[in-house]
Image (cartoon, rainbow, N blue to C red):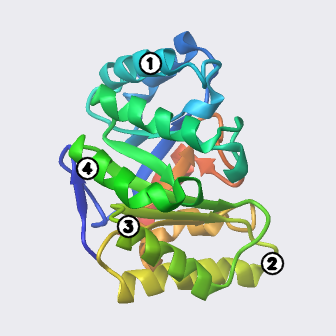
Amino acid sequence: MSCVTIRGCCIGEGRPKVIIPIVEHTEAAILKTAAQFSTLRADCVEWRVDCFEGAKDLSAIARCVAKLRVALKDKLFLVTFRTKAEGGNVELTHEEYLRFLHTVLDTDCADLLDIEFFTAGADLPKLVEQAHSAGAAVVCSSHDFHKTPPRVELVSRMVQMQQAGADLPKLAVMPQCRSDVLELLAATAEMADLHPETPVITMSMGALGAVSRLAGEAFGSAMTFANPGQASAPGQVSLGIVNEVLDALHL
């Protein structure tokens, strides 16, 4: 599997890189949490902009992104607006979503930018190109909070993300039974074995899928999300446990 190296951190090699989310509502709370997170054992901090009280205020977003870059020091910085259609808190039109992405890129502060596969639609290749021109790597994401699509669909979706130029295809799906978790893990392994052009990030959500957040390295998932106090998705395991398990599995 190839690697994506950002700030000296090689995503796709060795121990899966750990992401922790900021989900506070006010700028003051966001920056206070960022200062705390800058000292924790995690590789990347994600700001979930859809949790922000100014989620539709582009100038407020730009100011907060710039302040977060300083507060997070050398941590990788992932900026994400999870739309309501993909399980987030705020509904955006397509044009509003594009304006948000361009606002973040114009700050030149994000190391990684989440771009939703279905929300971007036909604009995805152009958006990826624009992100790369701005110096940001792209996490192209797709979420299903109701089911786990068949393995062939999961693989096809991630391959399309690769073909659009995304640096890190990401899938999060909800299992309805144990075999759904295996379906997600099998799709992850197939990507790592047959489509190693990029690292991938995959997870099966909820309590049933928690094992996928801990055993990703064995199947080919390059990053995992951990709960540093407030979870941003169902089934996120606490940061301390994630680090303990990843250390044990990696050894």
- Mark 4 or mark 2, which is nearer the start of the sequence? 4
The residue that mark 2 highlights is: 177
Work out how far the residue at label 1 is from the one at label 3, CA to CA, in angstroms: 29 Å
Work out how far the residue at label 2 is from the one at label 3, CA to CA, in angstroms: 32 Å
Residue 88 found in image quarter: top right
- Mark 3 or mark 2, which is nearer the start of the sequence? 3
Amino acid of disc 4: His
The circle drawn on residue 31 is none
Work out how far the residue at label 2 is from the one at label 4, CA to CA, in angstroms: 39 Å
Q: Is residue 80 above or below residue 153?
A: above
Q: Residue at x 33, y 61 (%)?
A: 167
- Mark 3 or mark 1, which is nearer the start of the sequence? 1
**Residue nearest the viewer, comparing 135 with 183:** 135
Amino acid of disc 2: Cys
**Residue nearest the viewer, comparing 55 with 174:** 55
At mark 4, the secondary structure is helix
Q: Residue at x 44, y 77 (%)?
A: 159
The residue that mark 4 highlights is: 132
The residue that mark 3 highlights is: 164
Work out how far the residue at label 1 is from the one at label 4, CA to CA, in angstroms: 22 Å
Q: Residue at x 53, y 45 (%)?
A: 239
Work out how far the residue at label 3 is from the one at label 4, CA to CA, in angstroms: 12 Å
The residue that mark 1 highlights is: 64
At mark 2, the secondary structure is loop
Residue 52 found in image quarter: top right
Q: Are marks 2 and 3 in contact (CB under 8 Å)?
A: no
Task: Judge left or right: residue 177 versus residue 26.
Answer: right
Q: Are marks 3 and 4 in contact (CB under 8 Å)?
A: no
- Mark 4 or mark 1, which is nearer the start of the sequence? 1
